[in-house]
Amino acid sequence: MNLNKDMDNSIQEISFDNTEIAFKSKSDAELKRTHLLFTAMNHNWLVKVGSALTLKALEWKLPVVWAARKTIYQQFCGGETIDRASEVIQALAKNGIETLLNYSVEGLENEEAFKATFDHTIYAIRFASKNKSVRAICTKFTGYEYRLV
């Protein structure tokens, strides 16, 4: 049993057994696209080949970002910024689905980039504090500079 603490401090059981509730916010077409995507992702060779081809296409500056946005990105992300994700957050909330804001970056090497990551995290915390459908935020601490004193 997985328990979820509601904002009013009562305990509510979360169940993933009722697919009607779990998928009520999705159209038949969205569910079919999702099924196709996950079926493809179950083939390791296809994921490896697709990942390699995508990296090469990006290296060669081919216009493939749109394809990623319509497939993988659309399935797992609500938007490139919190403001762009607000529409998805509101739509999920209408169906009783809460949101986790997740932000991660890799390869930061300068003070400006570390500050931008910090500022984004503060913005996410403030956004979440004003939106009851945003349950939590998640950030990768590798995006922050650390110094031993």
Image (cartoon, rainbow, N blue to C red):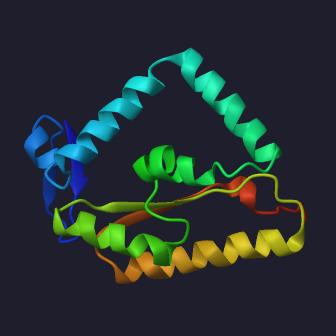
- Would residue 10 appear left or right of 69 to someone viewing this image? left
Q: Is residue 103 above or below residue 61?
A: below
> Is residue 113 rendered to the left or right of residue 4?
right
Which of 93/130 is in front? 93
Residue 125, position in %: x, y? 50, 75
Q: Would residue 65 be found to the left or right of residue 5 on screen?
A: right
Residue name at image x 88 percent, y 63 percent: 147
> Considering the image in quadrants, where does the N terminus appear?
top left
Q: How many numbered markers are drawn?
A: 0
The residue that appears at 77% across and 75% down in the rendered structure is: 115
Q: Along the horizontal axis of the image, is 112 left or right of 47?
A: right
Residue 91 screen position, x and y as percent: 25, 68
Q: Nearer the viewer, residue 74 or 2?
A: 74
Query: Where in the figure is residue 21, as x and y percent of width and height?
Result: 11, 48
Q: Is residue 91 above or below residue 1?
A: below
Name the foreground residue: 119 vs 24.
Answer: 24
Q: Position of residue 101 (x, y in %)?
A: 46, 63
Please tell me in which quadrant of the rendered image residue 59 appears. top right
Q: Quadrant of residue 31?
A: top left
Quadrant of the image containing the C terminus: bottom right
Above or below — where is 90 with respect to 148?
below
Q: Is residue 45 above or below residue 54?
A: above
At 84% from the left edge and 75% from the top edge, which residue is drawn? 112
The residue located at (47%, 74%) in the rendering is 84
